[in-house]
Each structure stands twice: as C-alpha cells, then as structure tokens.
Image: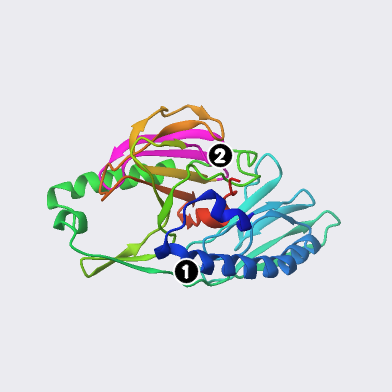
Amino acid sequence: NYGNFAAMVTITPDCFKQTLYNLVILISVFSIGLLFSFKSANACISVIRGEPVQGGLILFDSKKATKIKLDSKLISLNQENGFVVGFHRDDQAVRIITGICQDGSPFSLELKPTRRNYKIQKIDQLPNKMVTPPENTLNRISIESKMVKEARSIKGNSTEYFRNGFDWPLTGIITGVYGSQRILNGKSRQPHFGIDIAAPAGTPVTASASGHVVMVENLYFSGWTIIISHGDYISSTYSHLQTISVQKGENINRGEKIGTVGSTGRSTGAHLDWRINWLDKRLDPELIANIKE
C-alpha cells in the first residue's frame, strides 16, 4: 500500500525527504512485525493489523484467551472479542499483555514500541496572537480542551468501523507531518500530532472510517472541528473546516462528506488538520491509514 503513496498525494520538495524517511520506517516496522505477530499467535492472541511503533495502533483478536490485562489492568473487550493498543509519539516503555489461554495456561506478551525521529519545523514572522493566546481567551481554551477530551473518551463497542484501517479524508499537499516539533517565532511548542493536508478552500472532506459524530464545534485553536468515534476509544478529528455537513449524534459512513477545507481557528492558510486518537494517545494517521489508489 505505501508503494502507492505518491499516487495519493502531491509531494512537494520540502516534504520529499520526510516521505522517504517514513517509507524506511514502515519497511523496518514491517520486518519487526513478522516476529511480533508470530509471538502474539503463540500467546493465544493474534494481530489483525498494526505494529508496536511510536504513533502506531495494534488491533488484536483474543477469541482464544480470557482475563486479558494490559499493564495489570483488566481490558474490556469489544463485541468482536478483541482489543486495541495504541502508542503515543514519545512512548518508550514496554507494555505488557497477560491473560489465560483456552487450555488454562497463562501467557505474557511484551510490546516495545520502535522509536522514531521527528522533523523540526520552524515558522517565523507569525502575529503574536498566533503564538501566545490572549489572556482573555484562556478560560475558553480550558473549557474547549475539556470538551475535546470528553469527546475522545467515548468507548463504543465495535472495531468493525476500522478493522480495515482508515482512508485519507482528501487528496492534497502534505504540509505538516505527525510528531514534528514546531518552533513558532523562535519559541518551541508542543509537537504536531496530526497530518496537515493543504487544499483549496471548499474542497470536500470525507470521513476516514464509519462512526458516530461526537463533536461539532468552532474551537479557538482548531476552528470548526469534527470528532468521530469509531469504537474502542478510537476517534478521528478534522479541524479548520470552512463548512460543516454533519451534526453531533449522526452515524457517518466511511467516505461520506462531512465538511469542506477551510482556514478557521489559528490557521495560516486553507488546510485540513487530520488526527487519530486512542484515548489520550496521539496516533500517526499516516502509519495506520489505507492508501487511496
């Protein structure tokens, strides 16, 4: 699939090196994953998709096991008798999965996320309000942060929405990559946790996977924003939208139009900021998405 990456988006010279680096990472991760999947099968659980890598997501089938725990905490299985494990940008700690096989024997599996290097991105000559929010907006920002966290905390029951991965929500130029450290007017900011895709204002944006719309809000930082819950605490976020085509509470099908590209919120140009979360773990959409051919 990653061999078709160039057919999906327009690659600019600035992000060509980053794209090559991502391909190397994915090839390395695939090699590691062969051994990882084999170990998982022997441990009475099997990997449907995904690898242990920073920003990655693993979908497990656990029909042959019971009493499964992640780091000693009991896992609530989904309706397909499976579960997921996601890794944040900087996760380095080993995650330990334990449980009981059908024959009554215990098993243990260690997940050591592969480390990645990230791009440093400098943006200068921004207006001060784009770097440091005005004092009178801090209360609004705090309230909106809690709203987003609540929307991403919805579990859902099924993994059917994303068992086959995620589609890209539009075709465009990648102007920001996951994990990149942004330095705004010389001041270091938190890493970027999504993929920025530039496209003309009004370009249709589609749902990456089927799910339930849990947020539609005009937020200070991200402008018009839609969050879709896909089950098992997996959610996708679409920000800086110009127009909205869905309402909170709707069920959305994969590929259905949800809005259009815009530049609302703290944005310097028309683009989509696309993110995928597992609870508070920020995942890399480029690692876990399907590639449109």
Q: Quadrant of residue 74?
A: bottom right
User: Does 26 sit above or below residue 255?
Assistant: below
At x 18%, y 62%, the residue is 125
Give the number of the mark in front: 1 or 2.
Answer: 1
Instruction: Tell me the residue that label 1 is attached to.
Output: 17
- Per the rendered image, the range of residues in magenta is 206-232
Q: Is residue 257 left or right of residue 266?
A: right
User: Does 73 sit above or below residue 140?
Assistant: below
Badge 2 crowding class, 10 Å Cα cut-off, few under 14, some 14 to 19, many 20 or more, is many
Q: Is residue 86 visible?
A: yes
Amino acid at dot 2: Ala
Q: Is residue 197 left or right of residue 30?
A: left
**Residue 33 point in image, percent of width and height:** 69, 65
**Residue 14 point in image, percent of width and height:** 39, 64
Dominant secondary structure, magenta: strand
The local secondary structure at tag 1 comes to helix
Instruction: Tell me the residue that label 2 is attached to.
Output: 209
Near-viewer residue (24 or 36): 24
Mark found first going from the N terminus, 1 or 2: 1
Near-viewer residue (267 or 104): 267
Q: Are marks 1 and 2 in contact (CB under 8 Å)?
A: no
